[in-house]
């Protein structure tokens, strides 16, 4: 075990000192913070300035103010004497749009979706009142009749805000897990090829056994990846609360984060062993992307299923694949974030994923042992597997 620890410490020391790792971690953390804080950064887009021209501006102003208040949007209103002045204001950027005679909207290209809805709602309200008055119907009585109590909303899985926050967390989880797994598993594969191509592995194997070298490499790079995960989660949750995308963390967030860490470790153990075994078949970095295609496609399929699970957490497909490895490594944490999953299903999924990871480590380790010293021509799968049997 000391040999495994030494190899792991070597991997951590060498890779953590590289500019690529440090800058990559910094850039990733900044990107996660920016994405999580986008609602706050784009908050200025909820403030609009609208110009009003012509008859009925008073009624339209009141209707716009009411519609904007219902949408929690701030709309400032300015009056202009004629259409020419309003056009000049729009072109000069003084207003986002101008409404002329309650009949047309002037904008540089087109009014934003939110502002367009507000203006259309206000226009319909004013027009409806005018039509009612023309028909001899008191608009005030119609408005009073329309004041009905809204439907009471009852959520079986917490509040609506909790459901929204859980959805955001689920999508964030699947993206982060995919990005980290494909990144650090690629590190493992590149490290294997680099050591094999430079023949450093021959020197290393004079001091440690092949399985110890592979285990130490997987462990060391895995710890660096775990550190990345914890930094990203901490930065992301903090920025999400500050930015407003997740203003209040839903109940059970701490347990969810802990489960994500466990699933990350299980998924990493499975894919890292696979990537290392595949990489040991070749000796040149140029051949790496080609031989890794099947493993990358499998990870992509898992990512796509996990993303679909954020939208359909109760579907039969999601329930089945959240238990079957290797899909469970990404689908189960996503499903747990959105829905209440029975503990027995979580336990079964973890047990199966642990068995799958153990089997992959065993097979991958034997393939690695047989192929890592064979430089030159690419080792064929049939040859490697027959040697590993």
Image (tube, helix red, strand yellow):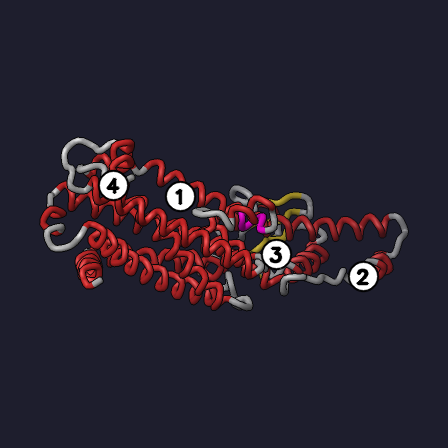
Residue 4 pos. (x, y %): 21, 59
CA separation, marks 4 and 2?
68 Å
Q: Earlier in the sequence, mark 3 or mark 1?
A: 3
Label 4 element class? helix
Q: Is residue 153 left or right of residue 276?
A: right
- Residue 46 visible? The answer is no
Q: Specify the quadrant of the image occupied by residue 219.
A: bottom left
Magenta stretch, residue numbers: 309-313
Secondary structure that dominates the magenta span? helix
Label 3 element class? strand
Q: For mark 3, what is the residue?
A: 79
Q: For mark 2, what is the residue?
A: 147
CA separation, marks 4 and 1?
16 Å
Q: For mark 1, what is the residue?
A: 299
10 Å crowding of disc 1: few (<14), some (14-19), many (20+):
many
Q: Earlier in the sequence, mark 4 or mark 1?
A: 4
10 Å crowding of disc 3: few (<14), some (14-19), many (20+):
some
Q: What residue is rendered at 14% in x and 33% in y? A: 376
10 Å crowding of disc 4: few (<14), some (14-19), many (20+):
many
Q: Is residue 280 left or right of residue 40?
A: left
In the depicted structure, whether residue 12 falls above or below residue 211: below
């Amino acid at each position: 075990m000391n040999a495994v620890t030494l190899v792991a410490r070597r991997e951590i020391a060498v890779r953590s000192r590289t500019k690529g790792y440090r800058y990559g971690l910094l850039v990733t953390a900044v990107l996660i913070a920016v994405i999580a804080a986008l609602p706050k950064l784009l908050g200025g887009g909820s403030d609009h300035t609208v110009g009003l021209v012509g008859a009925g501006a008073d009624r339209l102003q009141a209707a716009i103010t009411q519609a904007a208040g219902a949408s929690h949007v701030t709309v400032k209103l300015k009056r202009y004497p004629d259409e020419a002045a309003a056009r000049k204001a729009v072109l000069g950027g003084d207003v986002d749009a101008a409404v002329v005679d309650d009949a047309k909207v002037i904008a540089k290209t087109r009014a934003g979706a939110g502002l367009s809805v507000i203006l259309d709602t206000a226009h319909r309200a004013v027009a409806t009142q005018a039509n009612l008055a023309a028909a001899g119907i008191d608009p005030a009585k119609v408005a009073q009749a329309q004041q009905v109590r809204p439907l009471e909303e009852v959520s079986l899985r917490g509040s609506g805000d909790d459901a929204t926050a859980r959805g955001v967390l689920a999508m964030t989880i699947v993206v982060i897990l995919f990005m980290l797994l494909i990144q650090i598993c690629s590190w493992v594969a590149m490290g294997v090829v680099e050591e094999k191509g430079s023949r450093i592995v021959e020197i290393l194997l004079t001091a440690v056994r092949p399985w110890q070298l592979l285990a130490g490499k997987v462990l060391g790079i895995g710890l660096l990846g775990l550190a990345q995960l914890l930094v990203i989660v901490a930065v992301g949750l903090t920025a999400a609360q500050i930015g407003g995308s997740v203003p209040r963390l839903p109940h059970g967030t701490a347990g969810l984060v802990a489960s994500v860490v466990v699933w990350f470790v299980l998924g990493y153990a499975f894919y890292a062993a696979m990537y290392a075994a595949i990489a040991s078949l070749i000796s040149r970095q140029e051949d790496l992307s080609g031989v890794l295609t099947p493993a990358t496609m499998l990870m992509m399929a898992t990512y796509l299923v996990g993303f679909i699970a954020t939208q359909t957490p109760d579907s039969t497909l999601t329930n089945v694949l959240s238990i079957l490895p290797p899909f469970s490594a990404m689908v189960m944490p996503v499903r747990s974030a959105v829905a209440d999953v029975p503990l027995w299903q979580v336990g079964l999924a973890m047990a199966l994923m642990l068995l799958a990871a153990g089997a992959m480590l065993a097979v991958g380790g034997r393939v690695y042992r047989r192929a890592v010293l064979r430089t030159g021509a690419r080792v064929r799968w049939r040859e490697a597997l027959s040697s590993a049997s």
